[in-house]
Image (tube, coloured by chain):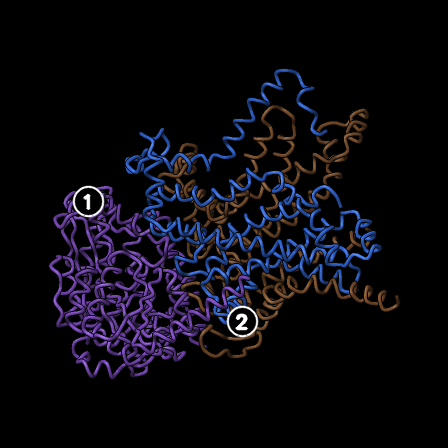
Chain colours: A brown, B blue, C purple
C-alpha cells in the first residue's frame, strides 16, 4: 500500500515533465536558445562563411552611427503610433455592425476577412491600388487635387502608404475582438444606465468600454506586436525603398544579414537585438498583467 | 445591448442603416473588388488603359488558366500544404501535451515554463533568423519541407500552449480528481478524459495555425530556395518579379494564393473566431 | 515522424550521391531558370557528355533569385563539383573564405590566357584565376529612332550633343532619358557610364573597391554631369521597373535608355524593330579617357570542397572552348567571352561585340564590382540623387561612411 501510494505520487511528479518534454525541448531548441545565440552573434564580425571575429560592442556602436538605423527606428515609431488607430477604428466598425438585422452575420464575416488574407497578397493588392498611371488611388487623388502621386515612390508618403495597407487587416482583427466583447457585455448594466438617461458617448465611455477592457487589452497586444513585426508588407511593397526611406528594423535586419546584398550576420543580429529589446518592453507588460491575473485566480 | 438595437429606431433610420451596410462593405473591400475585377480582364483592356471600366469581356478562364500554365503556382500551393498540414498536426499535438501538463499539475516551475512559451510566442522573427537558419543547415534540412515544418511547429507550440493551457484550466477539475481517486493513470486521464473534451480547442487552433503558417512569408523567404520547397507566399513574390506589369496575371495569382485560408475561414468560421478572440471576453 | 523521414531521406540522398560520385558523376549547380539559359545549359551538358564519354552530369538547376542565397549555403554544407557564379568582386567573398579552387592550370593548359583575355582581370583575385567565364553582354544607350525624328534631333556624337538634345525632346514632350529604378540597379548603369567616361576605368575600379573617398572632387564631377540630364529623366522612375521604362521607350514616350543588351527582347516585344531601335556607345565626356564598358560576365567555378575535381576541370576546359561558347551564346543571344568564337548575326550583338573587343577594359557592373553592402548603399544613393539632386552632399557623406565601414573590416 505504501509503495503503491508513493508510486502514484512519483508518477504525478514525473508526469508533467514527460508531457512537457517534446514540446518544451523543441521550443527551447528553435526559439529560446536562438535568442541567446543571436545576442552572442551580435558581438562578432561574421559574414556567415569564414571565421567570426569578436568585436565586442562595435556592431552597436556602428548602429548608432548609421542613418539607416535611425530611419528604421523612426519608421517603427510611426508604425507603432499609427497602428494603434486600428483599435478605435475596429471598435467603431464593431459598434456599427453590432445589430441583429437580416444578413448581418455575412456582413460581419466579409468585414473580417481581409485579416485571413496573407500580408503578401494584401501588399500586392495595395501596390495595385497605389500604382502610378493606373492605380485607383492616384486616380482619385488626381481627380481631387489635380496631381497624381506615386505614393510608394515618394519618400514623404511611402511609409504611410504601407501602414495604411497594414491597418486594413489589423482593423478587421480589432473589430472581431470587439464584436465578441460586445456580445458578452452585461445587458442589465446597459439597461440600468439607460434608465439613468445615459446615452451615446457617455454610455460608451462609462458603461460599455470598462466592460470591453479585456478585448481592448488583447487588441493592444496584437496591434503592438503586429506593428513591430511589420516585415512582409515592406518587403513586398517597396523593399525598403525609395532609397531606404521605408525601412523598419525587421526589414533592415533582413537586408543586412539575409538578402542578396547583405551578409553581415553580426550587424544584423545587433539590429535584431535592438528590435527584441523594444518588443521585450511590451512582452514584459503583457506577462506582468497575466501574472497578476494568475495570482488573483 | 449596445448600441441600442436599430429595431427600436424610427423606420427611416432602420432603412438608411440597411442601405448603408452594403455601401460601407463595398468601400471596405474596394481594393479587393478592384483586383478581383482586374483578374478577369483581358490583357488588351490593360494595354488600352481600361483599368476601371467594365471589362470588355470576361477573360477569367484564360487568365486563371495561364497563371497555372505559365508558373509554378500549382507546385507552390502544394508546397504550402506540405508545410502547413504537418505543422498544424505537430504544433497542436505537442501543445495538447504541454497545455495539459501546465494546466493540471502544480509544480514549482509551472508558471516559469508557461511564461517561457507565452513570451517566446511574441519575439520578433529576426532575433531567431540567423541561429535557426544555421541550425537547419547543420541538420541538413536547409531548403527542405521538413526544415520549415520543424521550425513552424516549434514556434507555433508557444501560442498553442497558451491556448490549450487556458482551455484545460477552464474544464471542471473534479473530473480529473475523481479519476485519480479511482486510480486511473495520468496518461489515461489525459487520453480518455481530457483529450475528448479538447475537441473544440483542437479545431479552433488547427484553423488558426493553418492560416498563420500558410500566410508566413519571412521564413518561406529565408529557408526555402528551390521550386519544390518554396511555399506560395514566397512564390508570389517571385511571380511579381517575373510578370511585373501583367497585372491581370498577378491579381489572378493573388486570388488563387489567398483562396485556401479564405475557404478555411468561411468553412470553420465559428472555430476560427473562437480561437482568435480567446481572452477577449473575460479575465 | 517528420524528423525521422527527413533523416532517412538525408541518409538516402548521401548514400546515393556518394555511391554515384565514384562512377564518374559530375554535380553542377547553376541558376539557369529562364527558358533560353536553360536550353543553352542543356545543350552545353549534352555536348560535354558527348565529348567525355564515361562522365555523367547531374545538374541541379536553381531559381535565378534564390540561387544567390542558396550558393552561400551549399558551398559550405554540400558543395557540388561545379557551381555557376559571377566575375569581379561578386566572387571575392567565396575566394576569401577559401570556398573556390584556383584554376590557373585550366587556363594555362587550354590557351585561355589568350582566348579569354578580355575577362582575365575580372577572374583574377590575389594573382590567381578562380573560374572560367562563358558569356557576357554589353551595356550602352538604346534609343528610339522615331522619337529622335519626331523631336528633330540627331543621334549625338558627343556628350554635349546628348545633353543639348534633351531640350529638343523636352519641347516635343518626350523624356530624353528613361529608366526604372524601383529595383535600384538600373540607376547604377548610368553611374557606371558617367564615371567611366568622366574619370576612366582605373578610377572607377578604385572607387568600387573602396580606395577613393566618395567625397573626392572627381566623384563630384561625375554627379555634376549627371545633374545635367537629371531634369530630363522620366519623372517617376523610382516608382517603375525597368520593363515599364522599356515600354516607355518602345512607345516613343522616351528617347534614350542606358541598359543592358538583354532588354532588346523586351523592346521587340513592345513592337520595336531593327529599323526603329538604335544602339550607341555611351559618348565620350572627358577627352582622352580610354573607353571602357560595362559587360557583366557569367562564370563557372570549382568549389574547394568538390568531390570530383578532375572531371570538374574537364568541364571548365570544355566550357571555355571556342565551339562550346559559340553554340551556347547562339542560344543565349549573348556574346562569347572566347575571342576565337563566332558571334550570331543579330545587329545589336554584332555592335556589342565590336564595341567590347575594342574597349580598353571591361567593368562588371557596379553591384558586381563593389562589395555587396557598398553596392546596395551606392545604388540607393544614386536613386536618391535622381529624385533629389539637392541632397548630393548628404548622399556622398553617407556613402563615404559606408565605404569606411566596409573597408575597415
Chain under numbered label 1:
C
Query: For residue C377, which quarter of the picture?
Result: bottom left
Query: For residue B4, which quarter of the picture?
Result: top right
Location of the N terminus of chain C (image quadrant): bottom right
Residue to which mark 1 is pinned? C271
Residue C103 percent coordinates (x, y): 28, 81
Residue B17 percent coordinates (x, y): 59, 23
When the figure is inspected, residue C286 is found, relative to residue A234, above or below; the finding is: below
Residue to which mark 2 is pinned? A59
Which residue, as the protein is rendered here, is positioned at the far top?
B11
Relative to B89, C110 lies left or right: left
Q: CA distance from mark 1 to mark 2?
A: 52 Å
When the figure is inspected, residue C96 is found, relative to residue B209, above or below; the finding is: below
Which mark is on residue C345? none
Relative to C272, C26 lies left or right: right
Residue A40 percent coordinates (x, y): 58, 73
Closer to the camera: disc 1 or disc 2? 1
Location of the C terminus of chain C (image quadrant): bottom left
Q: Nearer the viewer, residue B57 or B103?
A: B103
Relative to B236, B246 lies left or right: left
The local secondary structure at tag 2 comes to helix
Q: Nearer the viewer, residue B38 or A4?
A: A4
The local secondary structure at tag 1 comes to loop
Chain under numbered label 2:
A
When the figure is inspected, residue B275 is found, relative to residue C64, above or below; the finding is: above
Mark 1, residues whose alpha carbon is within 10 Å: few (<14), some, or many (≥20)?
few
Amino acid at each position: 500500500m505504501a509503495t503503491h501510494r508513493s508510486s502514484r505520487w512519483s508518477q504525478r511528479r514525473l508526469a508533467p515533465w514527460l508531457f512537457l518534454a517534446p514540446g518544451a525541448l523543441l521550443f527551447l531548441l528553435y526559439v529560446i536558445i536562438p535568442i541567446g545565440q543571436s545576442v552572442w552573434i551580435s558581438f562578432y564580425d561574421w559574414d556567415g562563411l569564414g571565421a567570426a571575429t569578436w568585436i565586442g560592442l562595435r556592431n552597436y556602436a556602428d548602429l548608432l552611427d548609421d542613418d539607416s538605423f535611425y530611419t528604421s527606428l523612426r519608421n517603427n515609431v510611426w508604425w507603432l503610433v499609427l497602428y494603434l488607430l486600428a483599435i478605435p477604428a475596429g471598435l467603431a466598425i464593431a459598434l456599427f455592425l453590432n445589430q441583429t438585422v437580416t444578413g448581418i452575420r455575412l456582413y460581419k464575416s466579409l468585414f473580417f476577412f481581409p485579416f485571413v488574407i496573407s500580408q503578401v497578397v494584401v501588399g500586392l493588392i495595395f501596390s495595385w491600388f497605389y500604382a502610378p498611371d493606373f492605380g485607383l488611388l492616384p486616380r482619385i487623388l488626381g481627380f481631387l487635387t489635380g496631381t497624381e502621386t506615386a505614393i510608394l515612390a515618394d519618400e514623404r508618403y511611402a511609409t504611410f502608404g504601407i501602414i495604411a495597407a497594414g491597418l486594413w487587416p489589423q482593423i478587421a482583427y480589432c473589430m472581431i475582438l470587439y464584436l465578441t466583447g460586445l456580445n458578452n457585455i452585461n445587458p442589465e448594466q446597459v439597461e440600468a444606465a439607460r434608465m439613468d438617461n445615459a446615452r451615446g458617448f457617455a454610455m460608451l465611455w462609462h458603461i460599455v468600454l470598462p466592460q470591453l477592457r479585456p478585448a481592448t487589452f488583447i487588441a493592444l497586444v496584437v496591434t503592438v506586436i503586429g506593428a513591430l513585426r511589420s516585415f512582409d508588407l515592406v518587403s513586398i511593397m517597396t523593399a525598403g525603398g525609395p532609397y531606404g526611406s521605408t525601412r523598419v528594423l525587421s526589414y533592415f535586419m533582413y537586408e543586412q544579414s539575409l538578402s542578396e546584398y547583405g551578409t553581415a550576420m553580426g550587424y544584423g543580429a545587433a539590429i535584431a537585438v535592438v528590435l527584441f529589446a523594444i518588443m521585450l518592453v511590451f512582452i514584459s507588460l503583457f506577462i506582468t498583467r497575466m501574472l497578476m491575473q494568475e495570482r488573483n485566480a | 445591448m449596445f448600441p441600442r438595437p436599430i429595431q427600436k429606431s424610427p423606420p427611416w433610420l432602420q432603412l438608411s442603416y440597411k442601405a448603408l451596410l452594403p455601401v460601407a462593405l463595398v468601400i471596405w473591400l474596394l481594393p479587393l473588388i478592384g483586383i478581383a475585377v482586374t483578374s478577369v480582364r483581358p490583357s488588351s483592356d490593360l494595354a488600352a488603359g481600361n483599368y476601371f471600366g467594365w471589362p470588355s469581356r470576361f477573360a477569367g478562364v484564360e487568365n486563371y488558366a495561364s497563371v497555372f500554365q505559365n508558373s509554378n503556382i500549382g507546385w507552390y500551393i502544394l508546397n504550402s500544404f506540405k508545410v502547413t498540414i504537418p505543422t498544424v498536426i505537430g504544433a497542436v499535438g505537442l501543445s495538447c501535451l504541454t497545455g495539459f501538463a501546465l494546466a493540471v499539475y502544480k509544480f514549482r516551475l509551472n508558471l516559469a515554463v508557461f511564461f517561457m512559451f507565452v513570451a517566446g510566442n511574441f519575439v520578433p522573427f529576426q532575433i531567431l533568423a540567423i541561429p535557426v537558419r544555421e541550425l537547419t543547415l547543420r541538420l541538413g534540412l536547409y531548403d527542405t519541407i521538413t526544415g520549415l515544418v520543424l521550425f513552424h511547429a516549434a514556434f507555433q507550440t508557444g501560442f498553442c500552449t497558451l491556448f490549450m493551457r487556458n482551455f484545460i484550466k477552464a474544464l471542471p477539475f473534479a473530473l480529473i480528481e475523481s479519476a485519480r481517486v479511482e486510480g486511473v493513470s495520468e496518461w489515461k486521464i489525459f487520453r480518455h478524459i481530457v483529450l475528448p473534451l479538447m475537441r473544440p480547442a483542437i479545431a479552433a487552433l488547427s484553423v488558426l495555425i493553418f492560416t498563420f503558417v500558410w500566410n508566413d512569408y519571412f521564413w518561406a523567404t529565408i529557408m526555402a530556395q528551390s521550386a519544390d520547397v518554396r511555399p506560395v507566399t514566397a512564390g508570389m513574390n517571385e511571380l511579381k518579379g517575373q510578370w511585373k506589369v501583367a497585372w491581370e496575371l498577378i491579381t489572378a495569382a493573388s486570388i488563387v494564393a489567398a483562396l485556401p485560408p479564405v475557404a478555411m475561414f468561411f468553412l470553420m468560421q465559428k472555430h476560427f473566431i473562437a480561437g482568435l478572440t480567446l481572452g477577449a471576453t473575460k479575465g | 515522424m517528420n524528423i525521422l523521414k527527413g533523416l532517412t531521406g538525408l541518409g538516402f540522398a548521401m548514400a546515393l550521391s556518394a555511391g554515384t560520385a565514384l562512377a564518374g558523376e559530375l554535380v553542377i549547380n547553376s541558376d539557369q531558370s529562364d527558358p533560353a539559359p536553360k536550353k543553352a545549359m542543356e545543350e552545353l551538358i549534352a555536348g560535354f557528355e558527348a565529348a567525355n564519354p564515361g562522365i555523367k552530369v547531374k545538374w541541379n538547376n536553381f531559381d535565378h533569385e534564390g540561387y544567390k542565397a542558396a550558393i552561400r549555403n551549399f558551398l559550405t554544407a554540400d558543395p557540388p563539383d561545379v557551381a555557376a557564379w559571377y566575375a569581379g568582386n561578386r566572387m571575392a567573398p567565396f575566394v576569401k573564405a577559401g570556398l573556390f579552387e584556383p584554376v590557373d592550370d585550366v587556363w594555362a593548359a587550354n590557351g585561355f590566357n589568350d582566348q579569354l583575355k578580355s575577362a582575365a582581370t575580372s577572374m583574377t583575385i590575389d594573382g590567381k584565376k578562380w573560374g572560367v567565364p562563358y558569356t557576357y553582354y554589353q551595356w550602352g544607350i538604346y534609343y528610339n529612332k522615331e522619337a529622335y525624328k519626331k523631336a528633330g534631333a540627331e543621334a549625338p556624337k558627343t556628350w554635349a550633343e546628348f545633353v543639348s538634345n534633351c531640350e529638343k525632346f523636352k519641347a516635343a514632350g518626350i523624356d530624353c532619358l528613361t529608366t526604372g529604378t524601383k529595383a535600384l540597379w538600373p540607376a547604377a548603369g548610368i553611374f557606371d557610364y558617367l564615371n567611366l567616361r568622366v574619370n576612366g576605368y582605373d578610377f572607377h575600379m578604385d572607387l568600387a573597391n573602396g580606395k577613393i573617398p566618395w567625397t573626392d572632387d572627381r566623384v563630384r564631377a561625375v554627379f555634376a554631369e549627371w545633374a545635367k540630364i537629371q531634369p530630363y529623366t522620366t519623372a517617376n522612375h523610382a516608382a517603375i521597373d525597368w520593363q515599364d521604362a522599356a515600354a516607355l521607350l518602345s512607345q516613343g514616350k522616351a528617347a534614350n535608355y542606358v541598359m543592358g543588351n538583354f532588354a532588346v527582347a523586351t523592346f521587340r516585344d513592345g513592337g520595336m524593330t531593327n529599323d526603329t531601335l538604335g544602339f550607341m556607345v555611351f559618348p565620350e565626356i572627358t577627352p582622352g579617357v580610354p573607353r571602357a564598358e560595362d559587360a557583366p560576365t557569367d562564370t563557372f567555378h570549382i568549389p574547394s570542397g568538390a568531390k570530383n575535381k578532375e572531371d570538374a576541370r574537364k568541364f571548365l576546359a570544355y566550357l571555355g572552348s571556342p565551339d562550346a561558347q559559340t553554340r551556347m551564346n547562339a542560344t543565349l543571344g549573348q556574346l562569347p567571352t572566347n575571342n576565337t568564337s563566332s558571334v550570331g548575326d543579330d545587329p545589336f550583338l554584332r555592335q556589342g561585340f565590336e564595341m567590347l573587343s575594342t574597349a580598353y577594359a571591361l567593368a562588371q557592373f557596379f553591384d558586381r564590382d563593389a562589395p555587396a553592402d557598398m553596392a546596395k548603399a551606392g545604388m540607393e544613393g544614386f536613386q536618391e540623387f535622381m529624385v533629389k539632386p539637392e541632397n548630393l552632399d548628404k548622399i556622398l557623406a553617407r556613402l563615404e561612411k559606408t565605404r569606411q565601414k566596409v573597408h575597415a573590416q
